[in-house]
Amino acid sequence: MKKYRYRLTLEPLEVPGVPASRVLSFEFDNHDDIFVILERVSQRGDFSAEEIPQLVLGLKLLGKTLMENKENALLASLKPHFNAFMRELKNSNPKETG
């Protein structure tokens, strides 16, 4: 299976009381080309340009964590709902545009 490697960096922008030097950066692998998924979700027309990366990255990171922690009781309770949501997202038709 092909793996894609990513680096995600988060840094505050003009947040009062938060030092600008505070940065969170981590790398992760995923079996999907996330940029292809971003484009696919963008074409659906359901979400704003700002919401799309938030949704896709959040789902990809959460899904990976769920898969890697199958025995965690807290996460196990979320998994059926997550799987149902992902099926709905993948199988639903894009929002009508125009």
Image (cartoon, rainbow, N blue to C red):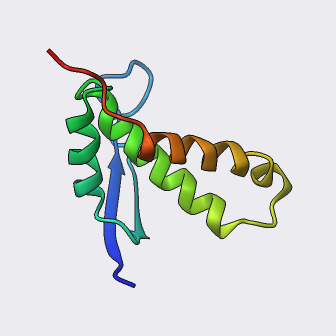
Residue 90 % position (x, y) = 42, 47
63 vs 46: above or below: below
Name the outermost residue toward the left.
98
Q: Would residue 22 be visible to someone looking at this image?
A: no
Q: Would residue 6 be visible to someone looking at this image?
A: yes
Image mark count: 0
Where on the picture, by quarter, is residue 21?
top left
Residue shown at 30% from the left, 24% from the top: 95
In the image: residue 20, left or right of residue 59 = left
Residue shown at 39% from the left, 18% from the top: 16
Residue shown at 57% from the left, 40% from the top: 85
Residue 64 % position (x, y) = 55, 62
In the image: residue 64, left or right of residue 42 = right
Name the outermost residue toward the right.
73
Q: Give the camera-side residue of 39 and 16.
A: 39
Residue shown at 33% from the left, 29% from the top: 51
Q: Quadrant of the C terminus?
A: top left
